[in-house]
Image (cartoon, helix red, strand yellow):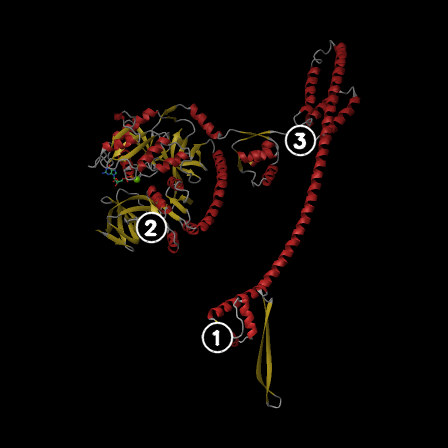
Amino acid sequence: MAEVTVSQFAEVLKVPVDKLITQLDEAGIKVSGADDVISDEAKMELLTHLRRAHGRQEDTAAPRKITLKRKAQQEIKVASVQGRARTVSVEVRAKKTYLNRTVLEEEQRQRQEEIDRQRQSEDAVRLEAEREEAERRDADRLERERLEQEANQKAEEEARVLAAEESARQNETRDRERAERERTEAKHHESEPARAPHAPKARVTEKTDAGKGPATKYGRKELHVAGDASARFKKRQQAGRHRRTVHVSMDTRHGFELPTAPVKREVQIPETITVGELANRMAVKANEVIKTMMKMGVMATINQPIDQDTAQLVVEEFGHTVIRLKENALEDQLLADADDATALPRAPVVTIMGHVDHGKTSLLDHIRRAKVAAGEAGGITQHIGAYQVETAKGQITFIDTPGHAAFTSMRARGAHVTDIVVLVVAADDGVMPQTIEAIEHARAANVPIVVAVNKIDKPEADLERVRNDLGKQNVIPEDWGGDTMFVPVSARTGAGIDQLLESILLQAEVLDLKAPTEGLAAGVVLESSIEKGRGPVATVLVKRGTLKAGDPVIAGQEFGRVRALFDATGKQVQSAGPSMPVAVLGLSDAPNAGDDLLVVDSERKAREVALYRQGKYRDVRLAGATKKVEDVFSQMGEESSGVVAVIVKADVQGSAEALRDALGKLSTDEVSVKVISSGVGGITESDVTLANASKARIIGFNVRADSAARSAMKDGGVDVRYYSVIYEAIDDVKLAMTGLLKPEIKEQIVGLATVREVFRSSKFGTVAGCLVSEGFIKRGNPVRVLRDNVVIHQGELDSLRRFKDDAGEVRAGTECGIGVRNYNDIRVGDQIECFSRVEIARSM
Ligand code: GDP
Ligand code: MG
């Protein structure tokens, strides 16, 4: 734009020249007249000034409301009566009022303040009223206390007076009687000589009774004592009838003027007592006890056993004194029995520990095969978690299953099962992390170690290296001046196994292991499961006494009568002595590994203790369950932040517990591992649901998911993994904790076949007639035998046949004959799982 004067600019802006000049002046632009030239900068300046001024104005004086009106005119044609159309014009007016929001908010605020003020004043009034009320109450209380105190003082005073009166009266009576006696003695001296000496005796007791009255610790005279005394007085005072009024008044005072306290008793409570029995001991009706317990928030029935602590609270509520009877009267009794019986030498109990793949299982299998006489039922050996071997020099009991975790979890439960640890170290591998762990466990349990240096058949075996490595761990061989026996063995060839057994027996001799064989038996549950057709089965290692069929027993929270006993070879036995492992049938449910099994003298006693324990643990469980829900919710909040939730399912209690304990210990400050559920048996649909709800992964240890669970898994993103080595499960959870676990499969199930028929042939042994239901069964792949979704055997295929021919691979929907190497106990309904190990490198 060219040069513009003020008047020209005013014209452009359509404002009067004077107004523009004033505005320019306000914006700080100096102009002397309408003909002054105005620069571009000046124009911009004016513009910004006007804008600013405008904005400010809006701030300060915004209109409260704006009303908009709209007017619209319409013409409509209307047909008239005469038939002619007429045009009518209609005006439509719409009016809308907009209120300024800030104004509204302001009003609202004012209203709120008003309300607050009102409320505050109301509060003040109420507080004032409360304060007055409290003062009044305080005053009342003080007054009451004062009155009570006065009453007490008065009562004491009276008691004192009474006591004085009483003793005065007694002195009087005594005096009087002495006088009387002297009179009678004088009178009947010869005729009734025996009567006189009795009288003073009676007086003496009466005196002590009555004199004790005011001095009892409750500050009162006991009703029955006083009544008794007065009755006796009455009898003897036929002569002095004037005394009677005094006694009556004494009775009245006792009955009404002195406060009556309930009779206090000393109530003995054993470890567990039923409500009815407790009522009995307190001499009250059971209803009273139940009512009192209800007030304490405990619902109980008359026959319900309650624990000592609860019973104590109830008894104290009734105002009696509690005498707690010694805990574990049962075990004490057992100990007493044990002490009576003479202890005899017993077989050592051995646990095999060592690093993974160093040959623990192979060694146990070899010893079992070579030394355990096969059972009756066609050589089928039942796996019960422990077995006993016979050697020329004596017996040895081997614990079959536990690794380190199970060993420690047993120990944590106070079950000292193992006498000797055999530490397996592979000669080609040397000391590894779990070797050191095993040494630490054995040391912690104060159990001696015998070292089995395994795989000496291998060319790369290096015995010296093993000795050196172990020396560094302070496990010193005997020929180096230490006290640990080293035995080179081969689980493959069997070399050195006899020497190993001998060394174990030698070590046992040093330990001088003894146990009584007489008396009520006691043992430890090694593992337990529920088997189809047999019910709960517990493997029990007898520690002392002799366990017999028919014995009433209690094991943890379970009870029952021993229905049958089986030894490790599956042979039914009638009894089991110290150090002998047996499968026990007849319990109410599967007890926990590590539970004590005790024989008691009656089944009733067993039931009582078990029910009591169940009650006690139910509370614990309930507490745990509520926590579970919280956990689930807290996890939802935390999402993936620092919690790895796990559900554990295992074939036996021992493994489930070992896993639970080991996983629980993995928790660090940043990441915690929560085992939200653990149990025995196949993975069920409800496990999957729980996993889904709580974003947990499922660990199946030697168990598989049933078909319902498998279909539930299909639509949910539940991570289910199967393991047969505890450490692998632990390692995977460790990786999950660090967020490194990639969806990678180490072991892949390639096929599943269901056993339809079982054939026994002389040529092929036991052959299972199967239908392949999923995937394929392939020769050369390892297999597992599943029963009720629990792995009962792992091994290799012996034969795979279709009709009469050998087959390399059999696909789903096809029938085939399967022989499993070294395993004959296949039954109809079992499943054979074919799997392969796929190594996928873990990406970090
Ligand atoms: P575990 O993990 O300690 O129970 O070890 P295993 O018993 O499963 O053995 C691991 C591997 O070592 C298996 O492949 C066995 O065949 C092999 N093995 C075990 N003992 C010996 C042995 O004395 N000599 C040889 N050469 N191999 C063995
Ligand atoms: Mg093994």
Task: Report which residue position mark 3 lands on.
Answer: 261
Residue at 27% from the left image edge and 51% from the top image edge: 777
Q: Amino acid at mark 1?
A: Val
**Residue 821 visible, this orientation:** yes
Q: Residue furthest top?
A: 190
Q: Which residue is mark 1?
A: 4
Residue in view at x 75 percent, y 15 percent: 175
The residue that mark 2 highlights is 742
Q: Nearer the viewer, mark 3 or mark 1?
A: 1
Residue 8 image offset from top left, x and y in percent: 51, 76
Q: Residue furthest front?
A: 32
Q: Classify residue 222 as left or right of residue 525.
A: right
Under mark 3, the amino acid is: Ala
- Residue at image location 48% in from the left, 75% down from the top: 4
In this rendering, position of residue 284 left or right of residue 397: right
Label located before the other in sequence (3 or 2): 3
320 vs 515, left or right, is right
- In front: mark 3 or mark 2? 2
Q: Are the residues flagged by discs 2 and 1 in contact, CB closer than 8 Å?
A: no
Q: Quadrant of ligand 1?
A: top left
Say what secondary structure mark 3 lies in.
loop
State how far apart marks 2 and 1 are (Cα): 78 Å
Residue type highlighted by circle 2: Lys
- Quadrant location of the N terminus in the rendered image: bottom left
Q: CA distance from mark 3 to mark 1?
A: 115 Å
